[in-house]
Amino acid sequence: MRDIAFVFFLAAVLCVTGGMIWGLQMAASNDHSMVGAHAHLNLVGWATMALFGLYYRVTPQAAEGWLPRVHAGLAIPGVAIMVPGIALATTGGSPAVAIAGSFLTFGSMAVFLFTVVRHGFGARSEPRHGAAAFAPAE
């Protein structure tokens, strides 16, 4: 199985590819009514997921265990639910789907915040234990 950095980066590339296709469609039709959903697909889907993937690649200790899988399990469905929800809300539908996706996306960011505080940024040369494991790398 591929590692978590690959999973996030693949999700990012799929999001930006879809975002580009959607942008081309909006430009060709001269209908930009979905620009908000399109922007969220590119920003949260492409930029954020790519940054998550890069973080896990350069901070390999953060990619270990079950928490990165929980992170992906919130982040990827969050975008997949939020973006269509925004499109639905834009066309007069209920914002409930967008709200649900937003809560998943926020949850994923809370997990990422915890991960960054716990592991810092960059690879460690030696494992740390106890309270030192929660301090940023020096």
Image (spheres, rainbow, N blue to C red):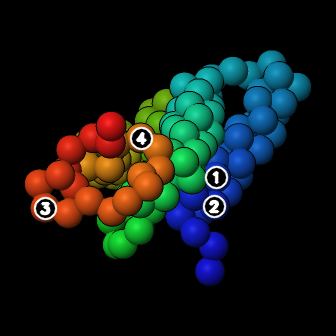
State whether residue 128 appears in this view. yes
**Disc 2 to disc 4, C-alpha distance:** 18 Å
63 or 86, which lies in front? 63
Q: Residues within 10 Å of mark 2 (few under 14, many from 20)?
A: some
Name the element at disc 2. helix
Q: Earlier in the sequence, mark 4 or mark 3?
A: 4
Q: Which residue is tagged 4?
A: 121
Is the residue under label 1 in contact with that under label 2 (CB below 8 Å)?
yes
Quadrant that contains the N terminus: bottom right
Q: Earlier in the sequence, mark 3 or mark 1?
A: 1
State whether residue 94 appears in this view. no
Q: Give the residue displayed 77% in from the left and 44% down from the top.
A: 17
41 or 56, which lies in front? 56
Q: Which residue is tagged 2?
A: 6
Q: Quadrant of residue 45?
A: top right
Is the residue under label 3 in contact with that under label 4 (CB below 8 Å)?
no
Q: Give the residue displayed 78% in from the left and 35% down from the top.
A: 20
Q: Give the residue displayed 69% in from the left and 21% down from the top.
A: 32
**Disc 1 to disc 4, C-alpha distance:** 18 Å
Q: Which residue is tagged 1?
A: 9
Name the element at disc 3. helix
Query: Which mark identifies residue 130?
Result: 3
